[in-house]
Image (cartoon, rainbow, N blue to C red):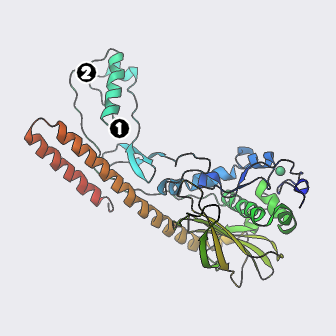
Amino acid sequence: MQLDSERCIFCSNPLVKGSVEHVFPSALGGRVTTTHATCESCNNAFSEVSTGAVEIALANDFIYIRNALNVWSGRGNPPPTIKDAGQFDDGVKYDLAPNLTPIVSKSRIPSKEDTNNQANLDFIAQDISDAQRILGILEKRGIKLESINAKYITTKAPIIRAELKFNGNKIFRAIAKIAVVSYIVLYGNLRAISDIYLNLRKSIISGSPDIANYCGWDYINDFPTVLDVQPHEKSPDAVQSGFDHRIFITNVNHHLVAYINLFGGFNFSVLLGNHSAISPKCLALNPTLGKSARFNIKFTPPVSYIPKNINSFKNEHKKVWGEVQSVTSAIVEHCQKLSRDEYIKKLSQDLMISVQTASDPSDIDRIVRGFCEKLAHVENGKRP
Ligand SMILES: [Zn+2]
């Protein structure tokens, strides 16, 4: 295979020097890359607003999942914090740090106007050092507070509700792109150009023809049956998480099909082309470890496949939504447990510090009782 005969899979320009393309998007923890898929301008198009920014849409729609599973990006960026994710019982807003950990939103410094007009100043601080930071700023403005009445307001770990909202068309284009780039990694650029429908490639890069003719959520068709999973030679210590990304490529009768699982349970399929002379292959990785973790998977293809069409989303909506909600709940439940444990650890540390700095035995009694109360609220946090 001559390298200089390779072409960009989307615009067909000669691929003189291909750009580094992630198979699964970096934001979803993808670390497998290839330079044999796209030219630089097509690669960039997937994050440009003018061409739909489909990869950004995919990353945003999975933001709660990325946060919950603590997914570091393939480029080494930390998991996302979700700003203003909700409110505590007392109305105080919180952000969600990774693992769905609620933290009081970073405080707003009272404005000059506030400090000029008000005798009583209310502000919310993340913790004691944040409060001291604000008091320091106020002091520099010449405001000396005569008395401070502080209150610890985090009374209960809130119920986290992941907001599910998927932009079907953009997501499908980003998913179909995963399938096409995987095909290149598994079978090479030239094979991909000869095997994959030109209209599918056009649809991915431009949105036309309608991607729904090729790709969609899939909880209707049977998926491949996994026979064996082994770590890939490039990551011999890789372990599965149950929240892994997998793409299976195989012929099913006269179709060439890609089956995709994201985070273990978000299922899609893509009709790539007509039957082709390839052997079935799978590309799989665990995105939750913050490092490369690939697998070799042996599987049996399904015996039949019904391609997606523009009515699939509408016709299968109830089924898809039910499945998507249940896999999301499983992920959120798994991680809320972790985040509650982290919260308890933080409470325990606060308890130790408070007890050490207490000046009076009756203070210690009060502090410990307060701790138990908070802990009880946390334990109750699972139900409203
Ligand atoms: Zn191109």
Question: In what element is the residue under mark 1?
Answer: loop
Identity of the amino acid at label 2? Leu
Quarter where residue 378 is shown: bottom left
| Mark 1 → mark 2, Cα distance in angstroms | 19 Å
Foreground of the two, 235 or 125: 235
Callout 1: 10 Å neighbours few (<14), some, many (20+)?
some
Residue 366: percent from the left, percent from the top? 13, 45
Badge 2 element: loop
Q: Position of residue 87 (x, y in %)?
A: 38, 47
- The kind of residue tagged 1 is Gln
Residue 28: x and y in percent read: 60, 55
Q: Residue at x 89, y 51 (%)?
A: 13
- Pointer 2 local density, CA inside 10 Å: few below 14, some 14–19, many at least 20: few
Residue 296 is drawn in which quadrant? bottom right
**Residue lying furthest bottom:** 303
Query: Residue 338 vs residue 82: left or right?
Result: left
The residue labelled by disc 1 is 126
Where residue 280 sits: x, y (%)? 73, 76
Q: Quadrant of the C terminus?
A: bottom left
Residue at 73%, 59% in the rendered image: 177
Is disc 1's CB within 8 Å of ligand 1? no
Residue assigned mark 2: 145
- Taking depth in this image into account, of 353 and 124 the one nearest to the observer is 353
User: Which residue is at a point 91% across and 56% down the rendered structure image?
Assistant: 5
Left or right: 42 as drawn, with respect to 364: right
Looking at the rendered image, the quarter that the N terminus falls into is bottom right
